[in-house]
Image (cartoon, rainbow, N blue to C red):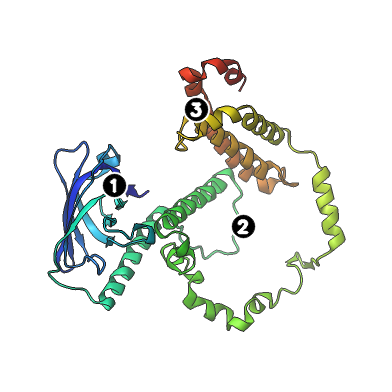
């Protein structure tokens, strides 16, 4: 995952006075010697050709220990006006893609910043080319997180429904989710509308340039998709037509079907947990950063309930095709249960919870 350094920065300097080379030094909390930076590429137009020096008035310990002492690689976005909320005299965004640490960035509005005069100036075309190069660097970094499997030629090969195969599939899904969250963190919601997220995620079929080739003119949106799909898909040569009554019967049958006992227990546990812990949760909300023992206890318990509903809540969960998927989900639920127990033990040892030992013991 990306390494964010801004809180740990004491002071630093970034020098792009030489074209196609960004050099710099970072002094970080807990480290005697500065981190040396030597990168290929240029900053954005506002500071390309300049030297930036910056100081953090309130540094604090951060993940600086994970940073290798020499950073070589490719520049990312380097600017003092990266986002609208950062467009102020002391805004700062410095990003690079390190051979040693992957994506590293500094972002904040509290730095004391000084920018030298331009030694050389970048034109608009050069800036667009640099931004495209930065997008490509982000795409390559995310591809390393995603680890897409090689495409298979054997489309007719029978699906492997084993637990191991499902676990691999779930891990792939987790990696995609992690990469997408990294993209959204960097580009924000705006990136969903201007193709940046689609590009860096490798979703080339979603890019604006490919839409016309795949779907035709805008007036025909939806029509190409519908072609050949007037009815429901065929299964074993039998076409399934939409039947309102059959669908209503299915919903009624689903609502009357008895839930799996494990699913019911998990659901009832979470409801009780959120009800009986509500007061304590409210009291801790102001100081909670999402990682307190109480947060972790609730989150892991909710993960179990949600995943069990997905794995055991379908009518055919007991079928042989679903067995591997169910086992893979249960294994994950076991990990969340262990994490929930660990968080619960922390709560039981905390002085502020000494009056609720009976409740915690029950949980």
Q: Nearer the viewer, residue 81 or 234?
A: 81
Q: Is mark 1 on a helix, strand or loop?
A: helix
Disc 1 versus disc 3: nearer the observer: 1
Disc 1 versus disc 2: nearer the observer: 1
Question: N-terminal of the two: label 1 or label 2?
Answer: 1
Q: Which residue position holds label 3?
A: 343
Q: Name the spot of residue 182 as percent of width and height, x first.
A: 42, 54
What label sits on residue 106 in the rendered view? none
Q: Distance between the residues labelled 1 and 2?
A: 50 Å
* Residue 79 sits above or below residue 220 on the image: above
Question: N-terminal of the two: label 1 or label 3?
Answer: 1
Q: Which residue position holds label 2?
A: 158
- Mark 2–mark 3 CB contact (< 8 Å): no
Q: Is mark 3 on a helix, strand or loop?
A: helix
Q: Can residue 355 be seen in this view?
A: yes
Q: Which of 129 and 359 is in front in this view?
A: 359
* Residue 17 sits above or below residue 214 on the image: above
Q: In terms of image quadrants, where is residue 58?
A: top left
Q: In which quarter of the image is the C terminus?
A: top right
Q: Distance between the residues labelled 2 and 3?
A: 42 Å
Q: Which residue position holds label 1?
A: 6
Q: What element carries label 2?
A: loop
Residue at the spot 25% in from the left edge and 44% down from the top edge? 67
Q: Name the spot of residue 73 as percent of width and height, x first.
A: 23, 58
* Residue 238 sits above or below residue 148 on the image: below
Q: Residues within 10 Å of mark 1 (few under 14, many from 20)?
A: many
């Amino acid at each position: 995952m990306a390494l964010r350094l801004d809180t740990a920065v004491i002071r630093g300097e970034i020098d792009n006075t030489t074209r196609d080379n960004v050099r710099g030094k970072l002094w970080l909390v807990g480290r005697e010697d500065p981190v040396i930076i030597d990168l290929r590429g240029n900053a954005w137009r506002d500071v390309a050709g300049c030297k930036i020096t910056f100081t953090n008035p309130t540094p604090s310990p951060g993940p600086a220990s994970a940073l290798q002492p020499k950073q070589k690689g490719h520049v990312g976005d380097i600017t003092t006006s990266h986002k609208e909320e950062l467009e102020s005299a002391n805004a700062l965004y410095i990003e690079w893609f390190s051979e040693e640490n992957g994506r590293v960035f500094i972002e904040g509005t509290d730095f004391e910043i000084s920018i030298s005069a331009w030694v050389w100036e970048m034109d608009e075309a050069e800036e667009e080319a640099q931004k495209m190069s930065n997008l490509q660097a982000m795409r390559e970094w995310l591809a390393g997180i995603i680890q897409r499997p090689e495409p298979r030629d054997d489309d007719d090969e029978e699906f492997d429904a084993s637990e191991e195969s499902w676990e691999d599939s779930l891990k792939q899904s987790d990696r995609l989710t992690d990469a997408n969250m990294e993209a959204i963190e960097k580009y924000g919601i705006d990136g969903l509308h201007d193709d940046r997220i689609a590009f860096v995620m490798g979703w080339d079929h979603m890019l604006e340039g490919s839409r016309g080739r795949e779907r035709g003119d805008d007036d025909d949106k939806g029509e190409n998709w519908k072609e050949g799909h007037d009815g429901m898909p065929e299964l074993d040569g039998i076409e399934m037509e939409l039947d309102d009554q059959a669908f209503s019967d299915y919903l009624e049958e689903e609502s009357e079907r008895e839930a799996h006992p494990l699913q019911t227990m998990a659901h009832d546990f979470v409801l009780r947990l959120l009800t009986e812990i509500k007061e304590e949760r409210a009291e801790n909300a102001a100081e909670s950063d999402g990682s307190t023992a109480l947060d972790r206890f609730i989150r892991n318990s909710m993960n179990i309930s949600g995943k069990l509903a997905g794995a055991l809540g379908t009518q055919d969960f007991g079928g042989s095709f679903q067995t591997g998927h169910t086992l893979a989900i249960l294994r994950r639920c076991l990990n969340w249960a262990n994490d929930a127990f660990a968080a619960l033990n922390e709560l039981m040892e905390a002085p502020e919870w000494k009056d609720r030992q009976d409740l915690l013991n029950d949980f």
